Image: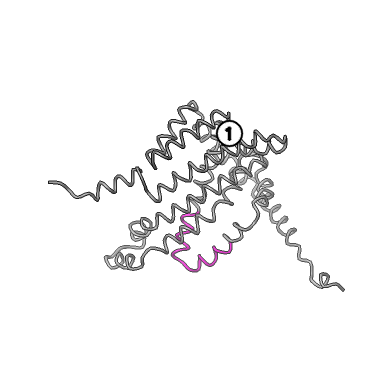
Amino acid sequence: MTPMSAVPNIPVGNAVEDGIDWITDNFGGVLDGISTFLFTFVDTITELLLSWPPLVGVAIFTVLALLVRSWGLAVFTLLGTLLIVSMDMWEPAMETLALVLVATTIAVVIAVPVGILAARSDSVSTVVKPILDFMQTMPAFVYLVPVVIFFGIGVAAGVFATIVFALPPGVRLTELGIRGVDSETVEAGEAFGGTPWQILRGIQLPLGLPTIMAGVNQVIMLALSMAVVAGLVGAGGLGQQVVSSISRIDVALGFEAGLSVVILAIFLDRVTGAIGQPTGRSLVSMVRKRRAAPATV
């Protein structure tokens, strides 16, 4: 008897497959509803982003970069988005941006409340952490297998896989941000008779906002990276261009699509980073400086 034969075979994969089949058989209507919702959501955002001419979109993104961050980011955004337009990648770039925005919105709506619960309850944190570990360490391509079974080939499968892949850092950094608030500040709020909700809203969330926004930033970055992988299941956008370039061995198409992803990633990273850590000419920074300035008689 070999050492391997001494260990009984545990059909974990078969059990998971049976569970997926059971979900598909019993919740087919729910899955169809989720698929329709996700497709409609992404399609609506895509139509909105493509409703104006590309040069108008370039101007909007440039102004947004200037207001939120700095002149430097505005110049980069202007040149980068013009490059995307010149490479004929504007439409797939907006499709990818729509997918990322939808996936990020849903992931954040789930991650922030779960992170708050984990920060306020050690029991919840103990249960959530191994689930997040599993989600982060499982190879991204593995998500695509059950997702395609649930939602079929298309945008909905790509969005759902992106949400699952991008959600963990949002939960972790929200919990870290809430737990990192100075305990004396929280105790002062309690001493003044603040309810748990008032302390959360007035003390913990504002003070933990930089860390929470860092989590949102990571969610966006992971969503963008997964959006390209989701091109394998028909999610469209730049991911589809990358997949097409691989199948056709088209180096030019692959490089242009990849460069467009890099430009989008830098833009989204700097904009969301500025919201959590206001610097330069950001609106938040200017308002704070104005309030902090001494009043003149």
Q: Position of residue 81 (x, y in %)?
A: 50, 33
Q: Position of residue 133 (x, y in %)?
A: 59, 61
Residue 22's place in the image compared with 41, above or below, is below
Q: Residue furthest top?
A: 53
- Relative placement, left or right, of 210 versus 263 is left
Q: Residue at x 59, y 51 (%)?
A: 165
Say which amino acid is labelled 1.
Answer: Pro
Tell whether position 29 is magenta: no
Tell whether position 123 is magenta: yes
Residue bounds of the magenta highlight: 111-131
Q: Residue at x 41, y 47 (%)?
A: 274
Q: How many marks?
A: 1
- Relative placement, left or right, of 118 versus 149 is left
Q: Position of residue 44 (x, y in %)?
A: 52, 34
Q: Residue at x 36, y 58 (%)?
A: 207
Element under label 1?
Answer: helix
Q: Quadrant of the N terminus?
A: bottom right
Please name whichever residue, 200 or 251, is drawn nearer the observer in this view of the structure.
251
Question: Please, which colouring scheme is shown?
Answer: one colour
Say which quarter of the image contains residue 129: bottom right
Tell me the residue that label 1 is attached to. Answer: 92
- Secondary structure mostly seen in the magenta stretch: helix
Please name whichever residue, 72 or 25, is drawn nearer the observer in this view of the structure.
72
Q: Residue furthest left?
A: 297
Q: Residue at x 41, y 61 (%)?
A: 178
Residue 47's place in the image compared with 231, above or below, is above
